[in-house]
């Protein structure tokens, strides 16, 4: 294991929410580390939807790589590793332990997300007929045959919601007994959604890898462009629980509007908190969390008690309240940004003899 390094903020998890938090805390002058095991829901995206300024053909991995490069460019330290433990010290700081990195930090931001519960195969590939985000992907199924998979309340609701985009919606319970309420059952029966109770036996895909149809155990084949499995989520909350952060009834971490949990110095953002699981939403949460961390950790303005404790007026030499490492990086970055563009045509001209 490497030597322990001290930071003001350590972000655990590297999705859009965690990356945005790290971007803000670093640019606001706080030594920041990000420890990310890799993967995650955003990394699975074949295309990026609903993110202004980002072309749809951008993959999740491309999106995340660009964001990581931005965060590192401003001076944050990025480690690809798995955080196995976090312990609170007597002084209120935290020891964060991963496989090859160990840090001491004043604040911890948990951006560990969740895993979608996958139904049993046969299933199409994610992004090629199997889709996890209704708000991201419903648009691509306008006037297309769609399935919703599951037997719970959420599955029934999503099946009815999909009628906003297409009139061909099947709800596939795959032989499971429906668990939706009687009221939802009556509501569902009044909508033009066909409930198919047979289990799936096989699947057909096109040459492009997209789902084309399911064949059921009774021999019937139904064509689909794609659909949404609704089997719930496994939230990665073990670290939050160990640190004393309270959970909501749905398994998410309870936070305020700025990502502060019920445990002092512990924040949470992104899919592990309540709300829509969307990249723009996650980025907004990360921005608010990063700004709140800045408010909590910044050196100036000092309170009157702090001024009295340090013996009177603040000397100019005490400023700026940014670490020397980030101060140097900021000067370098700003100098690079202010440099005039190079005229490639002019640079290519040979010098006079």
Image (cartoon, grey):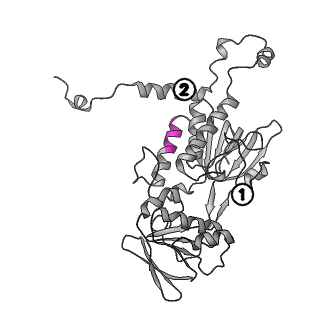
Q: Which one is in front, 329 or 14?
A: 14
Residue at the far right: name it. 90
Residue at the far left: name it. 353
Q: Residues within 10 Å of mark 1 (few under 14, many from 20)?
A: some
Task: Answer above or below: position of 48 versus 346.
Answer: below
Residue at mark 2 to residue at mark 1: CA–CA distance: 42 Å
| Magenta span contains residue 71 | yes
Q: Quadrant of residue 167?
A: bottom left
| Magenta span contains residue 8 | no
Q: Position of residue 102 (x, y in %)?
A: 69, 45
Mark closer to the chain start, 2 or 1: 1
The structure residue drawn at horizontal position 42% and vertical position 46%, both measured from the top left corner, is 54
Q: Position of residue 339 (x, y in %)?
A: 38, 25
The answer to whether residue 148 is left or right of residue 311 is left
Instruction: State the extent of the magenta-drawn residues as a range.
Output: 67-75
Q: Main secondary structure of the magenta part?
A: helix
Q: Which residue is mark 1?
A: 251
The answer to whether residue 143 is left or right of residue 294 is left
């Amino acid at each position: 294991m490497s030597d322990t390094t001290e930071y003001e903020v350590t972000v655990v998890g590297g999705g859009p929410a965690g990356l945005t938090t790290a971007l803000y805390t670093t640019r606001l002058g706080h030594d920041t580390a990000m420890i990310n095991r890799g993967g995650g829901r955003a990394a699975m995206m074949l295309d990026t939807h609903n993110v202004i300024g980002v072309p749809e053909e951008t993959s999740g991995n491309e999106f995340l790589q660009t964001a990581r490069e931005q965060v590192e460019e401003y001076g944050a330290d990025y480690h690809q590793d798995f955080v196995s433990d976090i312990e609170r010290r007597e002084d209120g700081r935290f020891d964060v332990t991963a496989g090859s990195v160990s840090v001491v930090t004043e604040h911890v931001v948990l951006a560990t997300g969740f895993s979608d519960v996958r139904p049993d195969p046969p299933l199409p590939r994610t992004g090629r007929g199997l889709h996890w985000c209704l708000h991201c992907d419903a648009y691509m199924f306008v006037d297309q045959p769609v399935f919703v998979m599951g037997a719970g309340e959420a599955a029934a609701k999503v099946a009815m919601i999909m009628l906003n985009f297409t009139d061909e919606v099947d709800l596939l319970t795959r032989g499971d007994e429906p668990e939706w309420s009687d009221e939802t059952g009556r509501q569902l029966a009044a909508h033009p959604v066909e409930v198919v109770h047979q289990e799936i036996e096989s699947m057909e895909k096109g040459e492009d890898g997209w789902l084309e149809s399911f064949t059921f155990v009774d021999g019937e084949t139904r064509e689909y462009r794609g659909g949404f499995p609704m089997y719930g989520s496994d939230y990665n909350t073990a670290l939050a629980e160990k640190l004393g952060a309270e959970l909501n009834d749905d398994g998410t971490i309870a936070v305020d509007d700025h990502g502060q949990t019920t445990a002092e110095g512990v924040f949470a953002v992104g899919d592990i908190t309540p709300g829509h699981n969307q990249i723009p939403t996650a980025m907004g949460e990360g921005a608010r969390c990063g700004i709140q961390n800045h408010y909590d950790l910044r050196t100036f303005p000092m309170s009157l008690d702090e001024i009295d404790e340090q013996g009177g007026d603040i000397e100019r030499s005490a400023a700026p309240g940014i670490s020397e490492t980030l101060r140097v990086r900021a000067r370098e970055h700003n100098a690079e940004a202010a440099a005039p563009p190079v005229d490639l045509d002019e640079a290519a001209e040979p010098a006079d003899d």
